[in-house]
Amino acid sequence: MRDTPLSNCERRFLLKAIEEKKRLDGRQTYDYRNIKITFGTDYGCCIVELGRTRVLCQVSCELVPPKDSRPTEGIMFFNLELSPMASPAFEPNRQSELLVMLNRQLERCLRNSKCIDTESLCVVSGEKVWQIRVDVHVLNHDGNLMDAASIAAISALSHFRRPDVAIQGRDITVFSPEERDPIPLSIYHMPICVSFAFFLQGSYLLVDPCEQEERVKDGLLVIAMNKHREICSIQSSGGIMLLKDQVLRCSKIASVKVSEITELINKALENDKKIRKEGGKFGFAESMPKERITTLKREEAPVEMADVKETANEIVNRTETPTEVVSSPVLVAMGTAQVGEGIVNSWGLDEDEEDEPQTEDTKTDDVMVISDSEEEEVVILNEEAQKSTKLSKRK
């Protein structure tokens, strides 16, 4: 399913508002939307909300053989998914240009910047290393997926803890979190992407474009930078020519935004660590709305317990005694019966029903002889009919 394109009136309205330095959500030109970072119950799970854009990131690890070219380094693997749940424009099981571009930018931002010490992920040189897998799922798309994905990925990597291992000869023992405390990853710096959208051939610039603003943009510039003002990667798309002054101006704005976002991530990590240590609510349980329940709630009513016995006796006296008293109740169930003299048949069959009615085809004159051999006793049925036939023959 393809997304509905913007009409000419909507396009002109958006461009006119940008010319007047106004945005649909009331932000200024260089303002970010509200960023909310929530960690899950397990280590390495993080949800980032950038306005109405929501991204879930999950980090996992496993022991794998290393690459032949780098036997002493761990492996970093990134995977980003765009599901139709996030936007009707995304098609399932199909790699679009946007998906390929986001995957490459995420790898360039986190892997090529060497923000994680991959040599610390080596367990046995040339045999076993840790493979860190970063899965990013887009839950809702409202623009600027790259920034939200980069914040979620670096936050989840900072929050992740890998199991501790012990090596004895050729044997490798992986300890559970109950046996030994898990070990955090060695992170040198936090690269974060900042997106700039250009309009009207680069005349106007916006930070953190929303989904409708991305539709009318002419070009996009993504700068990955850490808080030390070190540029990790730059990517320009859209086919517009950018001047050197424009790129320097964007880098200065990005340095300010990256320092603010890094401080926000560190505060979220400290709060999560503090709450886990104190044993309070952490993870998704903390983000649930308080003082709300999904069932009906009644106000507390006072109950008098003074004359409980008198009230109970009145209730017992008012009850009527049963008219018929059964000394030995009989419970009849399917497939059960009672055998004995003077006991009612509980099979549910009457004696009259047991006798099969005679059909019209049967003749009274027939004599039925049942005999298995010559030596056995002959049993004659319908004896009265046989006597009547003998008398008729004598006459």
Image (cartoon, grey):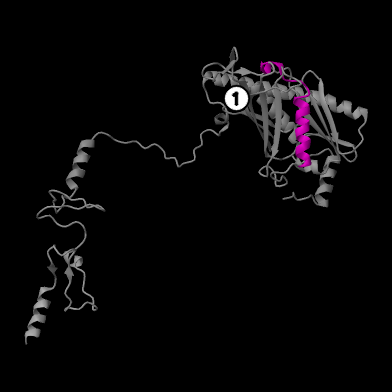
Quarter of the image where one finds residue 19:
top right
Q: Residue at x 73, y 46 (%)?
A: 89
Q: Nearer the viewer, residue 71 or 251?
A: 71
How many other residues sit within 10 Å of disc 1, few (<14), some (14-19) or many (≥20)?
many
Residue 247 visible: yes
Q: Residue at x 16, y 74 (%)?
A: 367
Q: Residue at x 93, y 31 (%)?
A: 243
- Vertical placement of residue 168 versus 334, above or below: above
The residue range painted magenta reads 96-124
Q: Is residue 169 left or right of residue 361?
A: right
Residue 213 visible: no
Quarter of the image where one finds residue 182:
top right
Q: Amino acid at mark 1?
A: Tyr
Q: Residue at x 34, y 36 (%)?
A: 302
Q: Nearer the viewer, residue 129 or 53?
A: 129
Question: Is residue 115 one of those drawn in magenta?
Answer: yes
Q: Position of residue 107 (x, y in %)?
A: 76, 29
Q: Position of residue 372 (x, y in %)?
A: 19, 63
Residue under circle 1? 43
The outermost residue toward the front is 374
- Vertical placement of residue 313 versus 392, above or below: above
Q: Nearer the viewer, residue 94 or 314?
A: 94
The outermost residue toward the bottom is 395
The outermost residue toward the top is 169
Q: Position of residue 137 (x, y in %)?
A: 67, 36
Question: Is residue 258 one of those drawn in magenta?
Answer: no
Q: Nearer the viewer, residue 136 or 86?
A: 136
Q: Position of residue 61 (x, y in %)?
A: 63, 25
